[in-house]
Image (cartoon, rainbow, N blue to C red):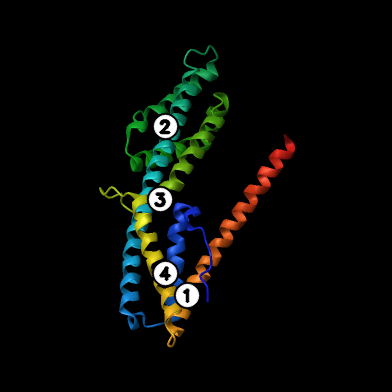
Amino acid sequence: MKLHPIKARNLRLAEVGQFIVRYFTDIDSLGLDLKKDIDFYTVHIELKMRSNAYHDAMKQIKAMAETKELEMLDMQRDHMITTLRRAVSVFEYSNNKDEKNAYQIAMIIMRSYTDLESENYEAETFDIQKLLKEWSKPENEEIIEKLELLKHIGNLKNSAEAFDNLFNNRSTTTVRKVSYNTLALKKQMMDSYGKLVHYVTGMISVKSTDKDFYIQILDAINNGRKYFADILARRKGIARKDTADTTRKE
């Protein structure tokens, strides 16, 4: 029985983690007593520990990316608040009596939320919801129409919802003050995987009897290797097609 070929180095960072998780899932499904071979079991546990460390690093990367995206979305909703204020202020010196009256009422509403942009995330979210609720009152419909604020209020609502969606569904992982070298952790994890795989294939090769334990393990290993090798093959095929299409266009 041969080891299914795969160029694991071509897997993306997240896929490498999934590749190793697939190994553990397939091995666990066998229900074998892995301590039957203590040397194999030792490397198996080593791989588990390194896999956990790698996943911690990936979680940190995700949490940091979410933090960055939240900052951008917060800035965007801040800009929409500023835009709404400016849209109201355009009518400060209007000669139209109705517009002037509408402006004065609008300013009463907006002055209640002067420091919105400097508040913390939760407080700003709460106050934006209050502001939008205020503008949604029936008595303010005419003011919105006269000052042409509908688009600006809609933009604020959309940017606030985008922020809230990410904030409420963000990773619960706290970004710990630990600096992970993701590439180094990946190398260590894959070194352990390589050591384990070569041990299994070696035992099948040298043992004349009692191979079934190792054959079952290799079969489980090959399941994951074939699955991810197929992903790489499909990706390579798409890349080749795109290159061929580009060449034909040129």
Mark with earlier residue (4, 2): 2
Q: Which mark is residue 198?
A: 4
Frontmost of labels 1 and 3 is: 1
> Looking at the image, which is closer to me, 77 or 186?
186
Identity of the residue drawn at 46% across and 62% down: 19
Mark with earlier residue (3, 2): 2
Q: Is residue 13 above or below residue 227?
A: above
Mark with earlier residue (1, 3): 3
Q: Amino acid at mark 4?
A: His
Q: Distance between the Cα atoms at labels 4 and 1?
A: 10 Å
Q: Amino acid at mark 1?
A: Leu
SS under mark 3 = loop
Identity of the residue drawn at 42% across and 30% down: 109
Q: Distance between the Cα atoms at labels 4 and 2?
A: 56 Å
SS under mark 1 = helix
Q: Which residue is mark 3?
A: 170
Mark with earlier residue (4, 3): 3
Mark with earlier residue (4, 1): 4
Question: In the rendering, at what x and y percent does residue 165 appear?
Answer: 46, 47
Q: Amino acid at mark 2?
A: Asp
Question: In the rendering, at what x and y percent does residue 151 appear?
Answer: 56, 31
Q: Distance between the Cα atoms at labels 1 and 3?
A: 38 Å
Q: Which mark is residue 78?
A: 2
Residue furthest bottom in the image? 209
SS under mark 4 = helix
Q: Which residue is mark 1?
A: 218
